[in-house]
Image: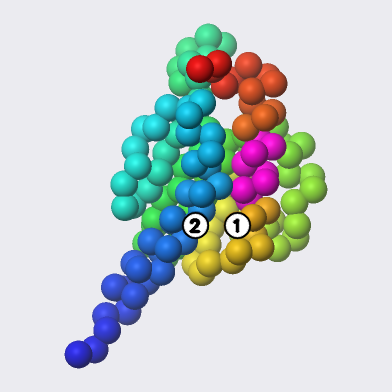
Amino acid sequence: MAVNKSDTKTADFSEILSALKLGIKPHEKHLTVIYDNDKGYYLNAAYSEKYNRDIFFAAVEIKKNYVSYHLFPVYMFPVLLEDISPELKKRMQGKACFNFKSPDKKLFAELKSLTKTGFQTMKQNGFIAKK
């Protein structure tokens, strides 16, 4: 029986989703889970009086041709991107999104560290609610 390429891609993307989710998961207890399913994982930070809404923190989503890792702290605080590697920079699309078509442990570890720094920065600036 022939293997459908889209089935293989879906399985690979599921593995990437699971691996990238590990970069956000440690912060879940301080955030609000919007959704957590086989297509993605999405977390919000605290409600902001200044912006009159909940502030997005991060998400991982399976798209048609890649898996996206959205990290809002780097949009709010672009200084966080000053020390990222050229390899991670190549994965950026827009100001706060990183796309992956295959697993990359080194870049996933760097992204996990960047997420931790982003979480700490948002907390220091009052965007993470104390729970």
**Label 1, label 2: how far apart the Cα atoms are:** 7 Å
Residue at the left extreme?
1
Specify the segment rendered in magenta.
111-118
The quadrant of the rendering that contains the N terminus is bottom left
Task: Return the x and y of residue 56 as percentages of the image width and height.
Answer: 49, 30
Q: Mainly helix, strand or loop, the magenta region?
A: helix
Residue at position x 53%, y 58% from top?
99
Task: Return the x and y of residue 121 as percentages of the image width and height.
Answer: 69, 28
* Amino acid at the residue labelled 1: Phe
- In the image, 79 versus 111, the foreground residue is 111
Give the structural element (helix, strand or loop) at label 2. helix
Q: Is residue 62 left or right of residue 87?
A: left
Residue at position x 49%, y 57% from top?
19
- Asked where in the image residue 15 lies, by quadrant, the reply is bottom left
Residue at position x 31%, y 47% from top?
37
Residue at the right extreme?
83
Q: Is residue 60 magenta?
A: no
Q: Is residue 110 left or right of residue 34?
A: right
Q: Is residue 79 left or right of residue 53?
A: right
Q: Is residue 93 visible?
A: no
Residue identified by numbered label 2: 19
Label number found at residue 108: 1
Residues tagged 1 and 2 counted as in contact (Cβ below 8 A): yes
- Asked where in the image residue 33 lies, by quadrant, the reply is top left
Task: Return the x and y of residue 59 as percentages of the image width and height.
Answer: 47, 42
How many numbered callouts?
2
Q: Is residue 112 magenta?
A: yes
* Amino acid at the residue labelled 2: Ala
Give the structural element (helix, strand or loop) at label 1. helix
Circle 2 Cα neighbour tier, 10 Å, few/some/many (<14 / 14–19 / ≥20): some
